[in-house]
Image: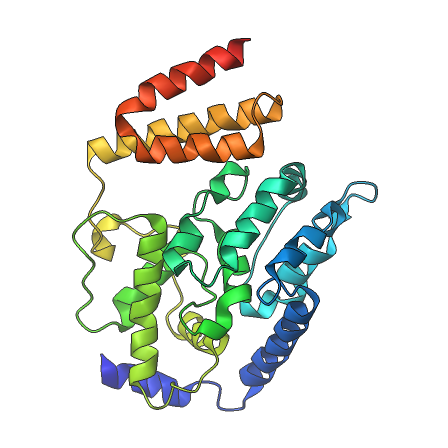
């Protein structure tokens, strides 16, 4: 596997065109970070304006997401729709709280991905938007790649990691994401030819040489990942229903953003009280 990988590495981008493209994108990322200094000054997140997300009057994307979706497209492609921008704008305070998590140096990559992005409709499931935000504000750490589909990471993991083996226990999306990226980066660092590559350049190499199948998700058996048992699936369904209940209550103004987060925390921490908590909130829903 290593010899085959080395051949592809040595043959990659012989004319340097891709490197020029990635270097330009990294300069754009530097400009983005100079404009949105959320890492250096987390309090500046509060200066973000709803129009930076979506401009209702002109029905167009705001500047913050214009950067992420267009100017920074070479380091990770996103395809968003206006209804997602509208939803983020509608839950603007929640979004700012999530930005604080994304730039927090004390949080691990797994914790950042596992933050409650799914409380904003359109930002849940595989959390592609969240992952690009996290990359853009954490790329200098060297422990994150601009690959946003977990299925693509699994595909690359099976292609270039020697004797790929996934932890037997069921893990969260963030833990899975962090593990897969750490394994790919270990391969990158173990090859002298790729050690100095920019992270987006390495990601581009993977996509160009090991293109993922067109399907969003490969068969679970092909990934080496243990399929969740029925109890785990039931818990996932219950949590999704609970989140939908919280979303409805917040939209109707019956709970605040802080109450939303507190209820979510109670759900995760107090398993024995979940039924009672859900019943209390349904009573509030009916008032």
**Residue in the picture at 65% in, 42% down:** 92
Q: Is residue 213 visible?
A: no
Q: Is residue 142 visible?
A: yes
Assign the N terminus to one quadrant of the image.
bottom left
At which x and y percent is residue 177? Answer: 35, 57
Q: How is the image coloured?
A: rainbow
Between 101 and 231, the one lying in front of the other is 101
Residue depicted at 83% across the width and 41% down the height: 57
Quarter of the picture holding the C terminus: top right
Relative to 33, residue 92 above or below: above
In the rendered image, the residue lying farthest to the right is 57
Residue projecting furthest to the top: 287
- Which picture quadrant has residue 82? top right
| Residue 221 pos. (x, y %) | 21, 51
Quadrant of res 166: bottom left
Considering depth in this image, is 51 or 18 the residue closer to the camera? 51
x 59%, y 82%: residue: 23
Q: Is residue 193 above or below residue 243?
A: below
In the image: residue 100, left or right of residue 268: right
Front one among 204 and 215 = 204
**178 is higher (above) or lower (below) than 162:** above
| Front residue (pair 168, 227) | 168
Q: Residue at x 49, y 70 (%)?
A: 139
Q: Position of residue 83 (x, y in %)?
A: 65, 39
Residue 188 locus on image (x, y percent): 34, 79
In the picture, measured across the screen, residue 4 lies left or right of residue 104, that is left
The number of numbered discs placed on residues in the rendered structure image is: 0
């Amino acid at each position: 596997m290593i010899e085959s990988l080395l051949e592809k590495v040595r043959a990659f981008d012989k004319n340097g065109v891709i490197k020029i493209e990635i270097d330009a994108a990294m300069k754009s990322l530097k400009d983005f970070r100079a404009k949105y200094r959320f890492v250096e000054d987390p309090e500046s997140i509060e200066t973000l304006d709803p129009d930076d997300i979506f401009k209702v009057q002109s029905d167009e994307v705001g500047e913050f997401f214009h950067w992420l979706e267009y100017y920074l497209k070479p380091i990770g492609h996103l395809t968003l729709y206006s209804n997602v921008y509208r939803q983020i704008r509608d839950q603007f305070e929640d979004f700012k709280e999530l930005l604080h998590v994304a730039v927090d140096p004390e949080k691990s990559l797994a914790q950042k991905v596992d933050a409650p992005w799914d409380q904003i409709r359109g930002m849940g499931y595989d959390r592609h938007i969240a992952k690009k935000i996290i990359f853009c504000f954490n790329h200098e750490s060297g422990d994150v790649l601009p690959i946003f589909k977990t299925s693509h990471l699994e595909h690359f993991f099976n292609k270039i990691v020697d004797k790929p083996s996934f932890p037997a226990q069921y893990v969260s999306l963030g833990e899975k994401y962090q593990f897969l990226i750490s394994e790919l980066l270990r391969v990158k660092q173990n090859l002298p030819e790729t050690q100095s590559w920019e992270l987006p350049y390495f990601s581009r190499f993977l996509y160009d040489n090991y293109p993922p199948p067109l399907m969003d998700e490969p068969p679970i058996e092909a990934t080496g990942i243990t399929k969740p048992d029925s109890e785990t699936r039931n818990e996932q369904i219950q949590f999704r229903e609970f989140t939908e209940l919280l979303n409805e209550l917040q939209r109707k103004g019956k709970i605040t953003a802080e109450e939303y987060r507190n209820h979510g925390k109670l759900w995760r921490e107090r398993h024995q009280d979940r039924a009672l908590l859900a019943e209390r909130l349904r009573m509030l829903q009916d008032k």
